[in-house]
Image: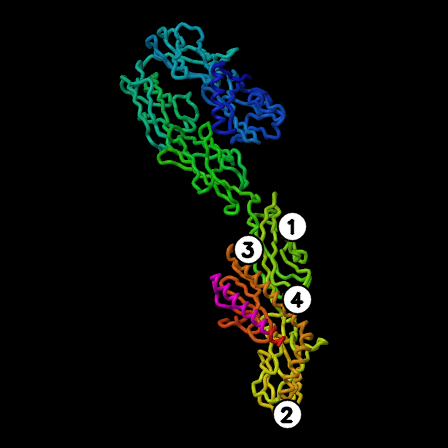
Amino acid sequence: MKITTGSRTMNGYWFVFHVAVLLLFGKEAFSQIRYTVPEEVADGTVAGNVAKDLGLDINSLTDRRFRVVSGNKDAFFEVNQDNGALYVRKKIDREVLCQGSGACLLELKILVENPLEMHYVVVEITDVNDHSPTFSERNQTFEIAEHTLPRRRFQVHTARDPDAGMNSIRTYTLTPNDHFEIDVLQSDEDKIPFLVLKKSLDREEKCSHSLVVTAVDGGKPPRSGTLNVTVIVLDINDNRPMFTKEIYEISVPENVLVDTKIFKINATDPDENLNGAVEYRLGKTLKKKVYDIFELDKLSGEIIVKGLIDYEENDVYKLDVEASDKGTPPLTGECRVIIKITDVNDNPPEIEITSLSNSVSEDSKPGTVISLLSVTDRDSGVNGNIITSIISDVPFELKPSYKENIYSLVTKGLLDREKVSYYEITMKATDCGEPPLSTFKTLSIQISDVNDNIPQFSQNPLQVYLSENNVPGKPIFSVSATDKDLKDNAAISYHIVREGSKNDIMSFLSVNSDNGQITALKGFDFETLKTFQFQVVASDSGTPPLSNNVTVNVFLLDQNDNAPVILYPLSSNGSAQGVEEIPRNVNAGHLVTKVRAYDADIGYNGWLLFSLQEVTDHSLFALDRYTGQIRTLRSFTETDEPEHKLLILVKDNGNVSLSATATVIVKLVEPKEAFAASDVKSAAKDVEDSNVIFYLVITLGAVSVLFLVSIIVLIAMQCSKSTDYTSKYLPETNYDGTLCHSIQYRSGEKRYMLVGPRMSIGSTIVPGSHANTLVMPDRRRTSEEVRLTYSTYRASSSDVSQLLFGLQD
């Protein structure tokens, strides 16, 4: 066994060529190595060390799945993964494997993985002299007329030797005699023996001759085969049929139909009668396949096709034709008809998948090798030229190798499993014949997932409206995010952002990490907290994990949980009771006093109504249900009682109303007494009202601070425009006698206002909404909103000022 090598100069050229191939085609193939192996060697015979010759690491052969790949089930060679040797797997018979005398070459594909590499090894099977020449028949008889002239030639059966080259037939020999000698005609690769008459025969001297023809091959030692030739000497018919040519050549397409007459030969014999009547027959030494495909009409000389012809099996047939007359003895003429088969495009291309990865990661870079494949066509010439392409619209392409009809299937673009998770790649191989034939091959490729998508919330930010006095420990709402990835890459967990937050509310909130359910650990009070904000983070379980957050804006809704508080009358002991002295001579409509009350709730829950529960005389006094003003209905008479007691009920408009009561005692005095008493009362009342004034001052200051904060927040939100809602804490005095406030905010295209005792002009109640929520006409311009807020503030401030002055008076 040996590796065929060249000179140093040629090795240098090959090295440069291999480097260029590597740069162009990656690691599909490094080189082509050639080994020589004789036929008939024992199983296990080593042809050469492929791994060593390829420069591969022997220790990594098993891990890299070092192997021989071949579409042929009867593989003659295998590689040893332990030492990298290429050895004979089964007995090789060159005569069966390669017919003919040309070089017998086997091309092997050596495949290694990680990275994927393809190498080609050519093994030449050399011939050994293991066959002896043989004749198709052991005996041959010639009938030769006695007056036959010397130098007459008679074709002897041709011997066959399956061996090739020097081991094929070299010569023919004849036993020594006086009348005959052997002559060999070289025709193509065949040697045709002829028996040549060198001296005329004399039947009376000897009627028959027994000769032995020996065929000898060129082996060492040579082998031989013998043919017994018997020559019978006749005494008539001295002319044999003659052909116009010794060799005829014709061409026949391989798709010719059975029973087609493809050629007609003609031989002439100058003899007359039976001696000139010619019959044709095929030579007896032809291959059996020839008799199965062709037949010769013995009378007309027409060659007829009787079997199927396949160019891929055999492209040429050689027919030895004999023409014999009917003389006694008959004379024979010989010729050879060479039938060349022309190829037609009758074989479609074949696509062989050498290696395939069924799953491809979606983050694979363009140019990643998915599969190796080879394309073959049994036809030749133009009919064997193949055009291979991908006909489906997929992000893959075929890249040719340095070796013809070898391709790599690679990615040509970025993959995204979330858009397309599965590809059917259809490849088409078409030859260049007429008409062209095509073959289709479909590969199924699955795209595997990587964590390349962050969790997504359907809405960001989230607006949540929560009634105050919620039950601690119960869920208040939930957040939900989705992830386009699969399995762990789409498994989402939730948590609340607490780091860096200065909001104490965060400590009273918790989230279920599995379903995003938010739970409040305490109840919220609208009167102390109107709104708050926090962030929830959704993280997937990929590696590395990806996350996204959502901002949650929580707006608390007021409930009627505060009863009205009486601000006036207010006695020194804290009870809601007061005494009012008026002159007897006042007219109807005189303002006796004004009951003032406050409710911490807003909207309907803070809208207060006044009513008289008890009164001494219903005809004397009237109470305004909205303002709390007590006025006289008529002038007093001498018969009226000097003292009257009024019990006033103050209640809000909540679903479940809450209330408070105040008692006012009205005393009737003479005008002079009333004027003198007013001075005393004013001095005494200064001390009693000091606490009330203190509370009102604090209230006025709080309203002013809230107004300034609202203005600052409004300007900041209009500048940033990050959200589409506004929240203002606005003091508002919409009716005399009641201190109240309202909350205004915007959501989408609507503005909402939680109002105090009276609704603003132009506002409407939304059906089905919270009882305290009004929808106001949208005012987009900031200046209008500022003017509205400012005017409301001025009204509230003036009202409080009047209240203070009224109390002082």
Q: Which residue is mark 2?
A: 640
Residues 693 and 735: in front is 693
719 w.r.t. 105: above or below: below
Q: Residue at x 36, y 24 (%)?
A: 339
Nearest-to-viewer mark from 1 and 2? 2
Pinpoint residue 22: horizontal percent, then vertical percent. 50, 26
Q: Disc 4 vs disc 2: Cβ atoms closer than 8 Å?
A: no
Image quadrant assignment for residue 679: bottom right
Whole-angstrom CA distance, mark 1 to mark 2, is 74 Å
Pinpoint residue 154: horizontal percent, then vertical percent. 37, 14
Magenta residue span: 775-802
Q: Which residue is mark 1?
A: 499
Residues 630 and 93: in front is 630
Whether the magenta-drawn stretch holds residue 796 is answered as: yes
Label at residue 469: 4
Q: Which residue is mark 3?
A: 460
Is residue 96 something that shows in the picture? Answer: no
Whole-angstrom CA distance, mark 3 to mark 4, is 26 Å
Q: Disc 3 vs disc 4: Cβ atoms closer than 8 Å?
A: no
627 w.r.t. 88: above or below: below
Nearest-to-viewer mark from 2 and 3? 2
Prevalent SS, magenta region: helix
- SS class, disc 1: loop
Residues 587 and 7: in front is 587
